[in-house]
Image (cartoon, grey):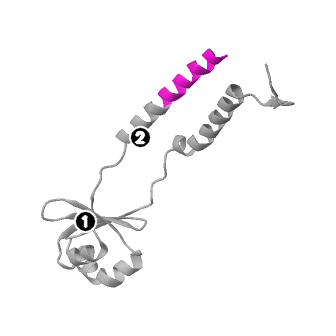
Amino acid sequence: MKKYFRGISFYILLFAVILIIFTLYTLPETNEVTNYSDLVRLIQQGQVKEFEVIDRTVIATLITDNKKVEVVIPSLEILYMDVGEEIGLLMKSDQLETAYREPSEPPWWITILPTLGLVVIFILFWGVFPPTVAGRWRK
């Protein structure tokens, strides 16, 4: 019985390592993170050529070196209160492109991992540490 669980644990460990490696290689690229006031200043100076809004995150591409800057904004309404006129003028003169996307959801297989993990742990403990009956180990 121990040999059986030893073999299963190897395949579970192998699956977990492959899953971790796959997840690490599919991570999105990281952008430079800056604060909200820098984003407002960059828009007011006309240094942003496009920005993409995803929920409360703005990814702005700068004109000078095509560098992407990521900023968490308080809300879209506050951004438009602060620099709405500048954004409107830049968009009318075709100097600024905007895009709005919904936040992405994790893949379905990542959402079921916690449940599968609990089931595997339960099965392993049930097989490795059998329940006691009247204070003695079951044989």
Q: Is residue 15 depicted above or below 81 in this figure?
A: above
Q: Residue at x 26, y 73 (%)?
A: 39
The part of the image, by quadrant, that contains residue 60 is: bottom left
User: Upstream in the sequence, badge 2 or badge 1?
Assistant: 2
Q: Is residue 13 magenta?
A: yes
Q: Nearer the viewer, residue 45 or 98?
A: 45
Q: Crowding near pointer 2: few (<14 within 10 Å), some, many (20+)?
A: few
Assign a secondary structure to mark 1. strand
Disc 1 marks which residue? 50
From the viewer's perspective, tell me whether residue 65 is left or right of residue 56: left
Q: How many marks?
A: 2
Quadrant assignment for the C terminus: top right
Left or right of 18? Residue 99 is left
Disc 2 to disc 1: CB gap under 8 Å: no
> What residue is rendered at 17% in x and 78% in y?
45
Amino acid type of the residue tagged 1 in the rendering: Glu
Check if residue 12 falls in the magenta segment.
Answer: yes
* Quarter where residue 57 is shown: bottom left
Residue that mark 2 sits on: 23
Give above or below for 89 relative to 50.
Answer: below
**Which residue type does callout 2 highlight?**
Thr
Q: On screen, 132 above or below 41? A: above
Magenta residues (range)? 1-15
In the rendered image, residue 118, in percent from the top left (x then y), is placed at 63, 40
Q: Residue at x 23, y 70 (%)?
A: 96
Q: Position of residue 86 (x, y in %)?
A: 25, 81
Which quarter of the figure is the N terminus placed in? top right
Q: Position of residue 132 (x, y in %)?
A: 80, 30
